[in-house]
Image (cartoon, rainbow, N blue to C red):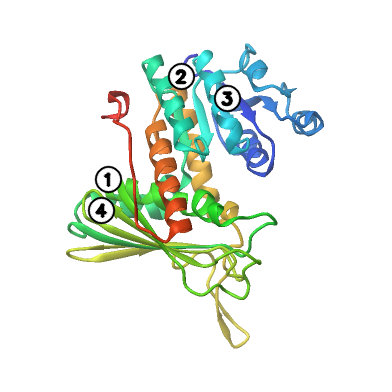
Amino acid sequence: MTQHSTLGVAVVGTGRMGADHVRRLDAVISGARVTAVVDIDGDRAKGTARGLAGCTAYTDAAAAMAAPDVDAVLIASPGPAHEAALLAAFAHDLPVLCEKPLTPDAAAALRVMEAETRLGHRRVQVGFMRRYDAEYLRLKALLDGGGLGRPLMLHCRHRNVGTPPGFTEQMMINDSVVHEIDAARWLLGQEITAVTVLRPRPSAGAPEGLGDPQLVLLETAGGAVVDVEVFVNCGFGYQVSCEAVGERGAARLGDDHGLYVTAAGRWGGEIAQDYVVRFEDAYDRQVQRWVDATRRGETEGPSVWDGYAAAAVCEAGVRAQATGARVTVELAARPALYGG
């Protein structure tokens, strides 16, 4: 396709995240339109496609990718379905924006990495949206510019109002802390080498059997230390913050968002209740950047290597969580395709 033509996108998965991306591509993003939606629930797919001109509903991702009006794929299906969808996209050499996780485990991520390497060029951008958040971008620029001196520590918080039924301790690492894992690797430019998980007394608000909150300690190859408070049933709001401490200063993001009001003898602001609200701008920026790069014939942003590294650290984190031991992270050799 040419840079001036509109990108036809197939959205795979039309649950909450997929539906939000469909809305984003249709109403917010320029240079693209949704030409196909895919869901194993055929009625849901048809219902989503009905409101989009020229959009076809499918129950099979590979069939959608073979359609002549599909130039790129946005994968927002559940993690276990990602590997098959990615391999199908590679078979058609289609650009992909894949929501995290790339795959639920490191072994599957390695298979995806090997398949993309065989293509000889990158096709996948992984959806770690914090890299597109305005505050995270400012902190990254500050660190890269040496404004804080050599970074020594990151202090992170990841709090959710509550968890849905069936939420497990492993999901605290795989679904929540995974964002801090990627953000730490990106902000510091260092791989994570070991994980330790500490457990304070559980909150009375935690569901039965869920040890919440937890403190996750990450060690990096460059000697920095990252601590992550993960508290997924805090009850009062969705809060994400990160403080970088360097040799010559510190900088913190995530303290305040939205309107600050003084009225009726009180002062304060609003706390976002979920990630879709807090990171709406980051999602918009992420998808627009993906569309723009794809129209130029380029692939940028978090790579399959980043998705693999995050999966490997998560696996170490889940073992550390279960055993109470410090667990080292074992990574495969980094292919040249990803700067290895």
Does dot 4 land on a helix, a strand or a loop? Answer: helix
Q: CA distance from mark 3 to mark 1?
A: 30 Å
Q: Residues within 10 Å of mark 2 (few under 14, many from 20)?
A: few
**How far is disc 4 from disc 2 in space, using C-alphas?**
33 Å
The reply to whether callout 2 and callout 1 are in contact (CB within 8 Å) is no
State the CA–CA distance, disc 4 to disc 3. Answer: 37 Å
Distance between the alpha carbons at the discs numbered 3 and 2: 29 Å
**In the drawing, what numbered circle is on residue 84?**
3
Q: Does residue 325 sit above or below 181 in this rendering?
A: below
Using the image as rendered, state which of residue 309 and residue 46 is in the foreground: 309
Q: Nearer the viewer, mark 3 or mark 1?
A: 3
Query: Label 2: which residue?
Result: 3
Which residue: 69% across, 40% down? 15
Residue pictured at 43% horizontal, 37% vertical: 307
Q: Which residue is disc 1 drawn over? A: 189
The quadrant holding residue 195 is bottom left
Tell me which amino acid carries mark 1: Gly
Q: Earlier in the sequence, mark 3 or mark 2?
A: 2
Mark 4 and mark 3 residues within 8 Å of each other at the beta carbon: no
Q: CA distance from mark 2 to mark 1?
A: 31 Å
Horizontal side of residue 20 vs 298, given as left or right: right
Number of other residues with Cα within 10 Å of mark 3, as a class: few under 14, some 14 to 19, many 20 or more: some
Q: Quadrant of the C terminus?
A: top left
Say which quarter of the image contains residue 225. bottom left
Instruction: Kindly identify which residue carries mark 4.
Output: 143
